[in-house]
Amino acid sequence: MSGTRLIVELIGHVVLLLWGARMVQTGIVRAFGSDLRRVLGRGLSNRFAAMLGGLVVTALLQSSTATALMVTSFAAGGLVALVPALAVMLGANIGTALIVKLLTFDISWVSPVLLTAGYVAFKRGGKGRVQNIGRVGMGLGLMLLALHLLVETMQPAEAAPVLRAVLESLTSEPLLDVALAALLTFAAHSSVAVMLMIVPLAAVGAITPVAALALVLGANIGSTIPPVLAAAGPDPAARRLPVGNLAFRALGCLIALPFLRPIAGLLDDLTPYPGAQAVDFHIGFNLALAIGLVGLLDPAARLLTRLLPDAAPPDDPARPLYLDAAAVESPYLALSHAARETLRMGDMVETMLRRLLEGIDANARAPTDEAVRLARGLDRLQDALKSYLTRVATEDMTARDAARLREILDFAVNLGHAADIVERGLAEHARRKVKHAIVFTPEDRADLADFHARVLADLRLALSTLMAEDPRGARELLDAKRRLSELERSATREHLDRLAPDRPDALESSALHLALLRDLKRINSHVSTIGYTVLEHSMPAGEAPDRLGDEP
């Protein structure tokens, strides 16, 4: 076989491998993307659980890049601390290495079975989860077929001087190998696919063992670049996780690079197969990185926070920060961006409520005016979010993604209602208090502060429920909503019992106090609706959560 024909065939097999990897990833995301996002959202309680969650999700997605994009949305939205988010990525790197090991076993005979079963499921499965599972089956079949063809095509590589000369020139220096593999991985958005290219090259001796290990290091670095670019934006804090992951991999590569020759000698003693040596090094590198860094995540998080501080609040609160127009073709990614923007809207509502209480306590207009400015900005931001969600590609959307879209949109609309109550209700009450110099009694001030704090706590719980889609949080939110309604009734009775008719402004003060409690409860009712939505999605078809006692 001529060198030219060999190179053409290799390129074709590599493209087939990349396309198979693409089919597997898109199929998994469309079939289980929402479920995997919830697994990550609920499994970030500590660094070890986070590592395990990252390993499992990445093994299913076959892409640490996709896992990084999901977790970045959680970390940027404040749902998860930076330390467990970094632990997720350490686990994700191990998951990638394990899936490469699995795919390099000699199971090429499974390829026809996967292709046939996948095709039947794809054609007969409608537009639901079964069809996407069929896509995954066909993708895995194509990957195994491409890997088998790569190995067969590489067998005569030593008899092809042109190919051998090209490979020798490209893999003559370890640093060049690292850069080459990093570039290929960045272009393919898949370290799994690049690793599966490296293995047959090493297996037939087309590249030296040291070059193979250097290419493995490059593949590890290349997979961290797309999340860094995806997090580019006005808020440096959103880049902490992807930059930290890139720094961890780069540090590991810098440490390992000078020792590639002795490592290659050690691996040669353990196994005589160069392809297996590259895979084992890939697993060992990421295991060593996880073990070595898991105890250093706290100082790493502090350093990243210092280097990438929170951005100053934008002058225009209506300007979207996270609605990436390029993501509308990938529903799971677009919905993550939309959820982050919705979290920001929730933060704006929290700031409005805090400013209002400041204005009420101090009988000052400036904090109230700031709250009104934010409320008007949130109204325009809500319009931008609605417009963004209407552009998301619905043809690639699963039923769960469609439900998630409605969930986000419904919550954003309710946040808009809360902002309207702030602007047209609470702000007017606060201004009336300033205009007439009304003074609350110490008991009324304490009741209002306690009620206000409970509403803020429920708002934060609602935002967490939106992101994690956890039924436990939803039930806790609805229980808190009922308790707040009971508190409002008891506070009203106690207020009326201690009403002092001898004060000239007693009636006006009383009316204002009760109006503030009523509007705060209305805001709480709007933000708590996410609890019903999450419970509805977690219940069997035909059932619905009990709305007894629900009040507008």
Image: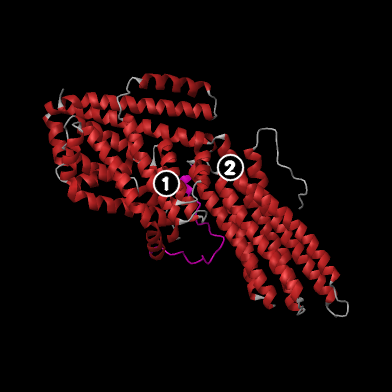
The spot of residue 228 in percent (x, y) is: 38, 52
Q: Residue at x 43, y 36 (%)?
A: 60
Residue on which the image places disc 2? 404
Say above or below: 436 vs 337: below
Give the tally of numbered discs: 2
**Quarter of image, res 116:** top left
Identify which amino acid the numbered label 2 is placed on: Arg
In this view, the mark in front (2 or 1): 1
The spot of residue 140 in percent (x, y) is: 38, 28
User: Which disc, if any, is residue 51?
Assistant: 1
**Quarter of image, res 433:** bottom right
Decide if residue 533 is on the left or right side of residue 154: right
The spot of residue 123 in percent (x, y) is: 50, 21
Q: Quadrant of the N terminus?
A: top left
Q: Say whether residue 397 is magenta.
A: no
* 317 or 483, nearer to the observer: 483
* 225 or 298, nearer to the observer: 298
Give the distance between the C-alpha atoms of the residues marked 2 and 1, in whole angstroms.
Answer: 26 Å
Q: Answer few, some or many: residues within 10 Å of disc 1's Cα (few below 14, many 20 plus, some between 14 and 19).
A: many
**Quarter of image, res 137:** top left
Identify which amino acid the numbered label 1 is placed on: Met
Q: Residue at x 39, y 49 (%)?
A: 227
Extreme residue toward the right, this view: 501
Say above or below: 513 vs 232: below
Decide if residue 160 is on the left or right side of residue 24: left
Task: Identify the secondary structure beneath mark 1.
Answer: helix
SS majority, magenta: loop
Question: Which residues, given as a range, are shown in magenta?
Answer: 307-328
Task: Identify the secondary structure beneath mark 2.
Answer: helix
Q: Say whether residue 325 is magenta.
A: yes
